[in-house]
Amino acid sequence: MTAPHRHALYTVAQVRALDRAAIDGLGIPGYELMRRAAAAAFAALRRHWPQVRRIAVHCGPGNNGGDGFLLALQAHEAGFEVRVLALADASGEGDAARARAACERGGVAVRRWREGEPLPEAELHVDALYGTGLSRPPGAPASALIEAINASGVPILALDVPSGLDADTGHCPGVAVRADLTVSFIGAKRGLHTGQAPACTGRVELATLGLPETLWQAAVPDAHLLQPATLPPRPRDAHKGRSGHVLVIGGDHGTAGAIRLCGEAALRAGAGLVSVATRAGHLPALNAARPELMAHAADGPQALEPLLARATVLAVGPGLGQGAWGHALWLTALDASLPLVLDADGLNLLAREPRRFQHDRPVVLTPHPGEAARLLGCDTATVGRDRFAAARSLADHFGAVVVLKGAGSLIAAPGGRLDVCPWGNPGMASGGMGDLLTGIIAALLAQGCSAWQAAGLGVGLHARAGDRAAREGERGLLAGDLLAPLRRLLNGLDA
Ligand SMILES: NC(=O)C1=CN([C@@H]2O[C@H](COP(=O)(O)OP(=O)(O)OC[C@H]3O[C@@H](n4cnc5c(N)ncnc54)[C@H](O)[C@@H]3O)[C@@H](O)[C@H]2O)[C@@H](O)CC1
Ligand SMILES: Nc1ncnc2c1ncn2[C@@H]1O[C@H](COP(=O)(O)OP(=O)(O)O)[C@@H](O)[C@H]1O
Ligand SMILES: [K+]
């Protein structure tokens, strides 16, 4: 079994506390941790790039630089050709200074890098400029060095954190290293999996440096990485009434596709019945394209009432619009007190008319960062600077489970519980993907999941289906391409 701490995610403050607990509580000197970190990263380098023999190591002023000096020394001792560039002159004390002195004593020349100088020829660059200590956007000359490393065209290994990425939030306040592999030490930093992080980290590996399990058992993680999951098989005597009835409400003029995708995703995610309430003009096309969907004309709230009476879960928002028609349906749907997934214009209307949802009624909100910003009354950049804070604040404010979409989607519940989705890909940045997610989560609610379970399972299945579908290429990926892999994943037919 995988150790529990491998799913746990920590803030930078918590990681620092873990470091201190290893040093003070377990009596392992900081310098020894640095040596182990360097050894773990060097082993990963050899494993991933067995042919590489000539490396350049870029060392910053703090302990991340110290890791880099010791990796350089270990590589030199292993017969590698090693160049070390330092951002700062040697300073007198501390583990990093000791590591630098050991490196130089061991026969590795350390050169101070100055802006404009070319990078040394190398088959791989090791980024040891900044780790968890990043305190501001990298300025000159570090920013120029980072850009030169990124432009080098050879693989990049980042130690602990790609330099320039805020390991707490997944936000890059300025330029950042774009690594192929990040070997992170001791505690998995929560900011390595969301926002701008996936563009910077490459693959992420955690090195626990031979520390005992007890170290993590004492720490309550801030968040968790979502794990692959599925629903149990249907009972042999199942009938459609036991798998719920999803009612999708939306599809104003011109946006019939959104409800079709949402409804079809609800069917493919196992809902027993799926109805769609939409503009009358959409019915012929919907019925022809997907006869399993029960499409109804809803010209106003009265037409919605009998449909609400039969539904067990509502998916409100795809293509709904914010005009009088959409607003009237939205009000009626929210008053129905049924379990609810609110997306797209359903959220934009909520931003205009905020209300808290009662806890006895499962509610999942699925904003992308733009919708989240409207709900919070801030701008999208503010959401991007701290996605964790944004998701938690929305969950608390509305009393609902919140999925903050985008690379590394976050799932937050009122009270602070939070999961991070490590799957998904940029091919999914295309129209209709969010509509699909809404339908999937609604279908999972209809099959008896709680809001928290439905949101986490739904986000995971959606992103993993996106990854399966992207094996045919990310560009040109269509939302509909996810439906077949989604069904396989949901039934446990793909690992
Ligand atoms: N004993 C420990 O605590 C361990 C620490 N380790 C390493 O130590 C790192 C943390 O070390 P530090 O706390 O020294 O932090 P860093 O080495 O990440 O950076 C801190 C230094 O960089 C400067 N700095 C930060 N942002 C800057 C910017 N934008 N422009 C210019 N200067 C900037 C700070 O003033 C400080 O001098 C970890 O990421 C990890 O790599 C590992 O060696 C494992 C053990
Ligand atoms: N770069 C990416 N990496 C991972 N997932 C992504 C990426 N871009 C988009 N997605 C996912 O695709 C979906 C897009 O949803 P949304 O923005 O609502 O799109 P739409 O408006 O087309 O329905 C979300 O689930 C989001 O997390
Ligand atoms: K680094």
Image (tube, helix red, strand yellow):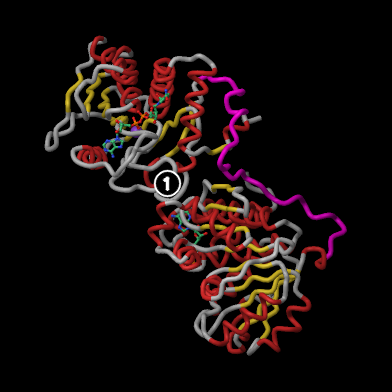
Residue 213 drawn in magenta: yes
Secondary structure under the numbered disc 1 in the rendered image: loop
The quadrant where ligand 3 appears is top left
Identify the image quadrant of residue 222.
top right
Q: Residue furthest left?
A: 116
Identify the image quadrant of residue 291.
bottom right
**Amino acid under disc 1:** Gly
Measuring 47% from the left and 25% from the top, which residue is drawn there? 19
Measuring 27% from the left and 28% from the top, which residue is drawn there? 61
Residue 492 drawn in magenta: no
Q: Is residue 326 above or below residue 135?
A: below
Is 350 or 316 nearer to us in this picture?
Answer: 350
Residue 270 appearing in the image: no
Which class describes the residues within 10 Å of circle 1: few (<14), some (14-19), or many (20+)?
A: many
Q: Position of residue 490 (x, y in %)?
A: 67, 53
Q: Which residues, given as a range, are shown in magenta?
A: 210-239
Q: Which residue is mark 1?
A: 170
The image quadrant where one finds the C terminus is top right
Is 349 or 304 nearer to us in this picture?
Answer: 349
Secondary structure mainly formed by the magenta segment: loop
